[in-house]
Image: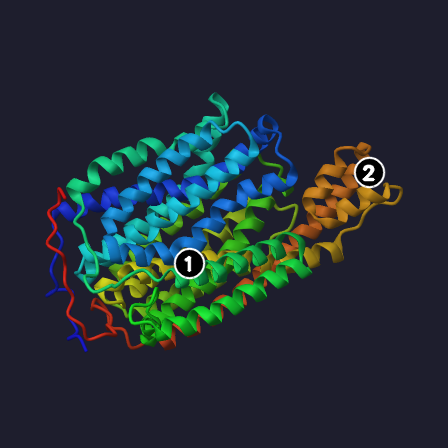
Amino acid sequence: MYEETTAASAERAGRREWIGLAVLTLPTLLLSVDLSVLFLALPRLTVDLHASSTQQLWIMDIYGFMLAGFLVTMGTLGDRIGRRKLLLIGASAFGLASVVAAYSVNAEMLIATRALMGIAGATQMPSTLALISNMFKNAKQRGLAIAAWMSCFVGGTAIGPVVGGTMLQHFWWGSVFLLGVPVMVLLLAAAPVLLPEFRDPNAGRLDLASVALSLGTILPVIYGLKETAKSGLAARPVLAIAVGLIAGIVFVRRQRTLTHPLFDLRLFRNRSFTAALTVFMIGGAIMGGIYLFVTLYLQMVEGFSPLRAGLWLVPSALAMITSSMLTPVIARRLRPGTVIAGGMALSAIGFLVLSQVDSTTGPVPLVIGFVIIGFGSGPYALCTDLVVGSAPPEKAGAAASVSETSAELGIALGLALLGSVGTAIYRGHVTVPSGIPADASAAAREGLAGAVSVAGHLPAAVGGELLDSARAAFTSGLNAAAVLGAVLFVGLTVLAATALRHVRPSVEPEIVEPKTIEREAIPAQA
């Protein structure tokens, strides 16, 4: 067992590492922006590329599918070939794919390039997080570095609609994809100078069968959860989830037999790793689900444009950024479990505020509740620190990839769970005025978007009546989802306070494997 090292005695990072951190935040910021700007560009590119409804869904979803599916593989591949090397390969591929996506001439071409962007994006997140773990060995400094990294991700999500809306007001839809090109060029120029190289010298060869099983596990599960969130329970998504779970069982069994597994399951023996990962995944699930409700409320209940809705979401993003940066400072004096539990409890209060919102109060109560949730979510940075810091340095890429994969799975699960709750409540509460054609009535009962579309083709009085009922029904679904979120966050409060009570302030978390760690002496210019 490693000897526990205090933050004061661990090797401290210098100026070069902090400048390198600024470089590492670039792809993180870009990937989060890219996730949000496409929502704004979709209407225009649909017209220009003559995309069908099915193609529109694949344009939106294929990026996330590929990103989630390849995270584990890319995280472990970085441990084998070098994290900086993989980061640069991924940056080059992402930049080239972005250019091709911007000038796509049909929907099929855009879907293919979005898939390539997702695979390239999967190299970025685990590589950056693993490099941060290797560069910042001091616990205090690493906590601040990961908080800054996460703040950039949150900030990118907030500024994405604003930047995207501005770009679309002056340029064509492909311009939103070109946002990433100068960022990747800067990364390619600066990384060889500022970032050291790290790899596991004893990693062994990449097991291709494990790669296939990993994809066979994650992709069907993500697909099934997303389809369930959109359309409810059906045979195809349930079958996809079942196939994914079977592949997952086979994957786990294979990892136990390999000398050099794709993912070392022994990491789960670490209490800090497992507990922090659980909090991160379940908390992310609820946050992802409620975020959808909040954005739909602003656009379809309040009637805001995507750009204006994005501006109303900025305060919650600023609250989360502020909390993320404060968390590692507070964790120097309080146990991480206490800090995380406090954040989860505060978020639970924010969910209770959302449970009291109605369709006539305006956006202020909604935003206040979401700001409270955002501020309480700051300790997620501490969860990430515990997950990555609990792994041996040569396994940091694998640990980072599991953290990011759990986030992707959590968001899909949250959308499916809270979306199903909201849809059931909506359908039970909406009242469609008599005399509306059967197909229009069915569309209005399906969801708020359908009701808004139908109301635009009805006489003003009838359309207004339908909208009032639909907006009230949707808000009731939001309230129910918020109550469920509050209950689950209370459970996370208890979990964090008990399962992480052994982790002391400002110390390096325990490491599982008593193995000598080697850092390759690779020159910065290599």
Whole-Å distance between the Cαs marked 1 and 2?
46 Å
Q: Which image quadrant: the C terminus?
A: top left
Q: Which image quadrant: the N terminus?
A: bottom left
Image coordinates of residue 15 in percent, x first then y, are 12, 46
Vertical arrangement, residue 260 with respect to residue 60, above or below: below
- Say left or right for 200 vs 246: left
For mark 2, give the secondary structure. Answer: helix
Q: Residue at left 37%, top 34%?
A: 96
Other-residue count near label 2 (Cα within 10 Å), few / some / many at <14 / 14–19 / ≥20: some
What residue occupies the far top of the structure in this picture? 170
Residue placed under numbered mark 1 in the picture:
405
Q: What's the residue type where badge 1 is placed? A: Thr
Image coordinates of residue 99 in percent, x first then y, are 40, 30
Q: What's the residue type where badge 2 is placed? A: Val
Vertical arrangement, residue 521 with respect to residue 121, above or below: below
Can residue 479 be seen in this snapshot? yes
Viewer-nearest residue: 10 or 228: 228
Mark nearer the viewer, 1 or 2: 1
| Residue 308 disc label | none
Question: Total label count?
Answer: 2
Q: Quadrant of residue 481?
A: bottom right
| Residue 462 disc label | 2
Other-residue count near label 1 (Cα within 10 Å), few / some / many at <14 / 14–19 / ≥20: many
Viewer-nearest residue: 488 or 365: 488
Image coordinates of residue 480 in percent, x first then y, are 63, 60
Image coordinates of residue 135 in percent, x first then y, are 18, 54
Mark 1 or mark 2, earlier in chain: 1
Q: Residue at left 27%, top 61%?
A: 396
Vertical arrangement, residue 306 with respect to residue 133, above or below: above
Viewer-nearest residue: 136 or 266: 266
Q: Residue at left 18%, top 72%?
A: 515
